[in-house]
Image (cartoon, grey):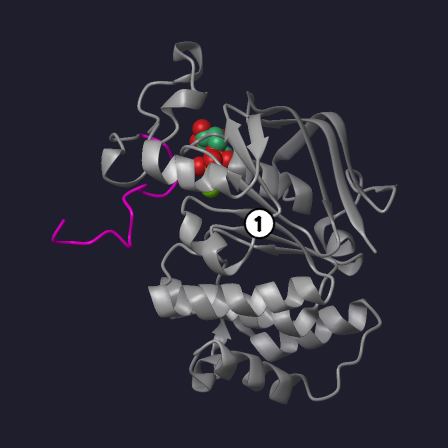
Amino acid sequence: MSTLSITNLGVVVGDQEIVKGLDLEVSSGQVHAVMGPNGSGKSTLANAIMGRPGYQITSGSIELDGQDLCSLPTWQRAQMGLFLAMQYPTEVPGVSVRETLELALQARGLDQIDVASRLDEEAQSIGLRTELLERALNVDLSGGEKKRNETAQLAVLVPQIAVLDELDSGLDIDALRSCAERIEIMTNDGLGVLCITHYHRLLDHLAADQVHILVDGQIVESGGPELAKELEANGYSRFITSEQEPDGVSVAIGGAAREGQSSGPDLEDPFADPLA
Ligand code: ADP
Ligand code: MG
């Protein structure tokens, strides 16, 4: 049993405070979804949890099973059983997925036997062509292939807690279903998930215990899966006050999204009916 506890977390990027006093707890077997408009700080939260350089913790704590992570480098957090599927997975020329996983398993003192065949098996189960596993990590993969690649790595690594930053972006409906269903099975075996998403579709296959709405670096509401459905229907406007709405930040999802200047992804719904 593992618990990731985030208490009163403040994160500064550059000279801007992005996450502003956030509390969140994810335990083994649970799925917590975080949803919020572009630029609300979702990826900043994910990066801070994983200890990405440049994300400065200014208040509060991030603990895994009572051990404070904030002073630890990323590799040590991974060694303790944290995993981050990045919104934009990094390309690593010259290093294969298999080598990466062997090193990661070795670092955690886990069995590295048959990594190649375990990876092949996981790739096949989520419809990732196994010849793509021969390539250097994420190099020359499409957006959707990268996301499937991350899911296959997750399934071989079996971390305690996985943070999934928009795993669904770039995935077609079939790939989304197979990746989400694979992760759902992992949660039944004890994986805890913090799942950042814009769309309830992911949550149709990966059942969320709780949904949290993140606006301007703060969780403004938490509830059950019905909250994700409400967002899909009505957007974020109910959760945003005029002071919280910086210029250009989209406050709705799907076709109702406004043009944004944020560095985040386009909020246009990739699954929307093109004829609608
Ligand atoms: P979200 O994932 O919710 O769309 P982000 O956490 O990516 O939002 O971004 C929140 C804000 O922090 C944005 O204004 C973004 O420009 C800024 N930000 C995030 N990461 C960086 C970075 N590495 N350098 C500069 N600004 C950043
Ligand atoms: Mg993001």
Comparing 236 with 73, the one in front is 236
Reply above or below: 190 against 149: above
The image quarter containing residue 266 is: top left
Comparing 76 with 242, the one in front is 242
Which residue appears at 88% of the width and 42% of the height? Answer: 66
Give the x, y percent position of residue 219.
58, 27
Q: Can I make out residue 211 in this image?
A: yes
Give the x, y percent position of residue 33.
56, 44
Residue under pointer 1: 208
Give the x, y percent position of residue 106.
79, 73
Queried whether the magenta region covers residue 273, the answer comes back as yes
- Looking at the image, the residue that sits furthest to the right is 66
Queried whether the magenta region covers residue 188, the answer comes back as no
- Whether residue 81 sits left or right of residue 49 in the image: it is right
Image mark count: 1
Q: Can I make out residue 92 in this image?
A: no
The image quarter containing residue 271 is: bottom left
Secondary element type, mark 1: loop
- Disc 1 marks a residue whose amino acid type is Ala
Q: Give the range drawn in magenta.
A: 261-276
Q: Main secondary structure of the magenta part?
A: loop
- Looking at the image, the residue that sits furthest to the left is 275
Comparing 31 with 4, the one in front is 31
Q: Is the residue marked by circle 1 packed among few (<14), some (14-19), or many (20+) residues within 10 Å? A: many
Which residue appears at 48% of the width and 76% of the height? Answer: 126
Quarter of the picture holding the N terminus: bottom right
- Whether residue 6 sits left or right of residue 153 in the image: it is right
